[in-house]
Image (cartoon, rainbow, N blue to C red):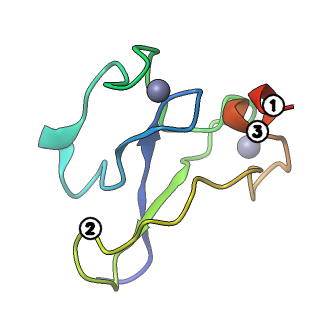
Amino acid sequence: MKGYDTALICPNGHFANRYKNSYPEQNTKHCSQCGEENISDCPACKKPIRGAYLGHALNSDHSPPPAFCPHCGKAFPWTERKK
Ligand SMILES: [Zn+2]
Ligand SMILES: [Zn+2]
């Protein structure tokens, strides 16, 4: 497997699932840490948010969520909220 999975993440930047496509059974509607509704695509351009790198061992990717959408350049909700 190569490339990236899609992330399921809440607007505060808490990952719900870094493997939305590979492990859909782990998907949840709301964040377990803050209760907000999880998203998996950019609110501005609707492209999927990058999840874990599939070349690495499972759950070895602990990188923080991306600050900006690489497709449209808009700040993600968790980036805006940190201001
Ligand atoms: Zn949260
Ligand atoms: Zn975008």
Q: Position of residue 19 (x, y in %)?
A: 30, 55
Name the side, left or right, on which 39 lies relative to 33: right
Q: Which residue is mark 2?
A: 59
The alpha-carbon separation of the residues under discs 1 and 3 comes to: 4 Å
Which residue occupies 78% across, 33% down? 82
Indicate the quadrant where residue 29 lies: top left
Indicate the quadrant of ligand 2 in the picture. Answer: top right
Secondary structure under badge 1?
Answer: helix
The residue at the far left in this view is: 25
Which residue occupies 34% across, 76% down? 54
Q: Which residue is mark 3?
A: 79
Which residue occupies 31% across, 75% down? 60
Three-letter code, disc 3:
Thr
Three-letter code, disc 2:
Asn
The alpha-carbon separation of the residues under discs 3 and 2 comes to: 23 Å
Three-letter code, disc 1:
Glu
Q: How many residues crowd mark 3 within 10 Å: few (<14), some (14–19), many (20+)?
A: some
Compare marks 2 and 1 and give the one earlier in the sequence. 2
- Point out which mark residue 67 bears: none
Proximity of marks 2 and 1: CB atoms separated by less than 8 Å: no
Q: Position of residue 21 (x, y in %)?
A: 28, 52
Question: Which sits in the foreground, 54 or 32?
Answer: 32
Asked if disc 2 is less than 8 Å from ligand 1, the answer is no
Indicate the quadrant where residue 66 lies: bottom right
Proximity of marks 1 and 3: CB atoms separated by less than 8 Å: yes
Q: Which residue is mark 1?
A: 80
Name the side, left or right, on which 72 lies relative to 77: right
Q: Decide: is 25 above or below 12.
A: below
Q: Position of residue 51 (x, y in %)?
A: 45, 58
